[in-house]
Amino acid sequence: MIKTGGLADVSAALPAALKALGLDIRILLPGYRQVLAQLPACSEIARIAPLADLPPARLLESKTAASVPLLVLDCPALYDRPGGPYQDEAGRDWNDNALRFGLLSRVAALLGGADTPLDWLPQVLHCNEWQTGLAPAYLRYAAGARATTLLTVHNLAFQGIFEPGLVAALGLPPDCFNPDGVEYYGKLSYLKAGLQLADAITTVSPGYAREIQGEALGFGLHGLLAARKDSLHGILNGIDTTLWNPATDPLIPCRFSAKTLANKAGNKQALQRRLGLADTPAVPLFAVVSRLTEQKGLDWLLAIAPQLLALPAQLALLGGGEPQLERGFAALAQRYPREVSATIGFDETLAHQIEAGADAFLMPSRFEPCGMNPVPYTRLTPPTNK
């Protein structure tokens, strides 16, 4: 539908797992062009009135592939456009991101408060990252009953910082702009607002929860996080063991399990042939499926790639991100066509085939290393006696 890294995997898998446990859950997401194109049978269930500079919108209802109820925020003026959810086709941030995600936060809060237009009021409103960081603020300053709020931080480096004049444009009360509210060093920070005002905070691992309370990896928010340490919980990322089960995965050529590890070799051979790599079973095949950013340490990988390939070894990369890294890996693949494949962009089927066929997975992150990629496929490689 639309996917940006591990956050998308968690956002899809966690609600399905909670639903399987019997919880009554809904997912709210913006009506991006790619989303609506795949949900032609959406039905309108509510209309959202404008607020300050936030335009009117519709709330549409559908379901995910796992039959989890889906609420789509339809506002063509903010979401119906080419490019990605955060940036245009040239990789530039949309200049109205403050309003785009202000509206998302406002509607999330509306659904979690006394004025909800739905016949359903959640007990917990779970927000992810800065894009929904204002939802706890909208709820905190609203009257009446409200849901308990939980903010999950997947990457503290992205904070949603904007000019203070947007407070009025977003329909927030003027008195919220203070250090105990949404203000952050004279700016408006969506993430800081959520960290300050959510009832509880989680992040992707116990280790990352500790790290972000220190100056080195706290990105200016370490003091606030340390002050809220009793409300901060690190929960290690899990995986969808149905979607990523190599014994049943329809996207890989050769299914295998812990009892049939020999079948894994067929996935490596099929991957090498698909990517144009040399068909060399004994040469280790390293893999990367990632956003291409310095945060993920991929500039380090690019720098040592010639030494890695000289072992000998092969490299299969899938991802997109910073233009200089995209160009660098594309050039590396052109220089070593039988040893390196670099697929810029994202392909769900190829991601599964890389995970199933690789001998080892590379994740040289500078910080926040608990992504979703170290899945069982790369941990089921049979041991050798060498």
Image (tube, rainbow, N blue to C red):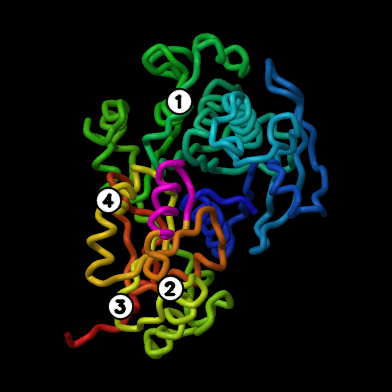
Give, as a three-letter code, the residue at label 4: Ala
Q: Point out the tag, 1 or 2, that comes first from the N-terminus.
A: 1
- Please say whether residue 145 is visible from this viewpoint: no
Give, as a three-letter code, the residue at label 1: Ala
Give, as a three-letter code, the residue at label 3: Val
Residue 64 locus on image (x, y percent): 67, 58
Q: Report whether 377 appears left or right of 349.
A: left
Q: Point out the tag, 4 or 1, that comes first from the N-terminus.
A: 1
Residue 331 locus on image (x, y percent): 41, 53
- Please say whether residue 354 is visible from this viewpoint: yes
Q: Point out the tag, 2 or 4, that comes first from the N-terminus.
A: 2
Check disc 2 and report the residue beneath it: 277
Number of the front mark, 1 or 2? 2
Question: Quarter of the image holding residue 118?
Answer: top right
The span from disc 1 to disc 2 (Cα, nearest Å) is 48 Å
Name the mark on residue 283. 3
Q: Secondary structure at mark 2?
A: loop
Q: Point out the tag, 1 or 3, that comes first from the N-terminus.
A: 1
Question: Quarter of the image holding residue 289?
Answer: bottom left
The span from disc 3 to disc 4 (Cα, nearest Å) is 21 Å
Q: What segment carries the magenta color?
A: 319-334
Number of the front mark, 4 or 1? 4
Check disc 4 and report the residue beneath it: 303
Check disc 1 and report the residue beneath it: 193
Q: Residue at x 49, y 77 (%)?
A: 273
The quarter of the image holding the N terminus is: bottom right
Residue nearest the observer in this picture, 16 or 309: 309
Number of the front mark, 1 or 3? 3
Q: Point out the tag, 3 or 4, that comes first from the N-terminus.
A: 3
Residue 288 locus on image (x, y percent): 39, 60
* Dominant SS type (magenta): helix
In magenta stretch: residue 228: no
